[in-house]
Image: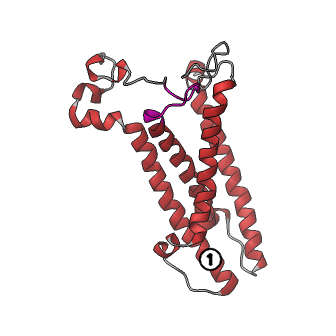
């Protein structure tokens, strides 16, 4: 067990942090939402009831949406674009790595590499496809959770009739929620790309070696 934890410590740490923060989000969101309901003379929701509410679903998927858009877009952009001096970029002028070519496969290479054809073409882009599919699912979760939260808010405030998810998709409210997250994600990526040109973090694969020149590109 100790060996397993040592070999998987990075994923264990990040998934543990995710679980803790998501749990805390649900608890504090539950309290905030019940305070809002109380202001309108409505009954408080149970914790389990809150987990099915538009308020919680929207808040969760609104953030997941932007995170996976950032990661999927980042993977694709770094496949084709470079930034001289950044540890987040492949070296300027580098084409396909020898390891990316099917003819250089080894016995330990993943099965799609040996199968070739369509399986290989899909596998060559599977990371960005998977991330962008999660983004698409999160986008829908944000949309349906958001319209539920929007309809509840409108009903409490003015008694307005509910709108459909398609109608909510055309509102400024939905796109304001998305854009305020999307812009911050790409700002963070740009900061990492540019700061890694001149700054270092000893021991991190996201950083160039401490002794590397600022012009050195790639980690």
Q: Residue at x 35, y 18 (%)?
A: 98
Q: Residue at x 59, y 77 (%)?
A: 151
Foreground: 30 or 47?
30
Of helix, strand and loop, which one carries label 1? helix
Query: Is residue 145 visible in this depiction of the protein?
Result: yes
Badge 1 crowding class, 10 Å Cα cut-off, few under 14, some 14 to 19, many 20 or more, is some
Residue 156 against residue 109 in the figure, above or below: below
Q: Position of residue 202 (x, y in %)?
A: 68, 18
What residue does disc 1 label? 152
Give the colour scheme shown.
secondary structure
Q: Residue at x 77, y 76 (%)?
A: 38
Give, as a single range, the part of the protein colored magenta.
Answer: 78-90
Q: Quadrant of residue 44?
A: bottom right
Residue 80 part of the magenta segment? yes
Q: Quadrant of residue 189?
A: top right
Q: Is residue 118 left or right of residue 80?
A: left
Q: Is residue 154 left or right of residue 28?
A: left
Quadrant (top left/top right/bottom left/bottom right) for the N terminus = top right
Q: Residue furthest top?
A: 211
């Amino acid at each position: 067990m100790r060996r397993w934890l040592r070999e998987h410590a990075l994923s264990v740490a990040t998934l543990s942090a995710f679980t803790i923060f998501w749990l805390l989000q649900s608890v504090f969101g539950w309290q905030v939402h019940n305070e809002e309901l109380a202001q309108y003379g409505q009954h408080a929701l149970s914790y389990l009831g809150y987990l099915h509410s538009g308020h919680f679903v929207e808040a969760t998927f609104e953030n997941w949406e932007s995170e996976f858009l950032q990661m999927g877009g980042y993977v694709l952009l770094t496949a084709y674009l470079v930034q001289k001096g950044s540890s987040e970029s492949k070296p300027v002028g580098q084409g396909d790595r020898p390891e990316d070519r099917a003819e250089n496969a080894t016995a330990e290479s993943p099965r799609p590499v040996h199968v070739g054809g369509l399986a290989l073409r899909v596998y060559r882009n599977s990371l960005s496809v998977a991330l962008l599919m999660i983004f698409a699912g999160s986008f829908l979760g944000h949309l349906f959770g958001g319209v539920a939260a929007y309809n509840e808010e409108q009903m409490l405030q003015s008694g307005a009739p509910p709108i459909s998810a398609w109608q909510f998709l055309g509102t400024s409210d939905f796109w304001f929620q998305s854009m305020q997250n999307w812009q911050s994600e790409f700002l963070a990526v740009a900061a990492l790309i540019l700061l890694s040109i001149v700054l270092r973090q000893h021991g991190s694969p996201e950083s160039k070696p401490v002794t590397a020149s600022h012009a050195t590109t790639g980690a």
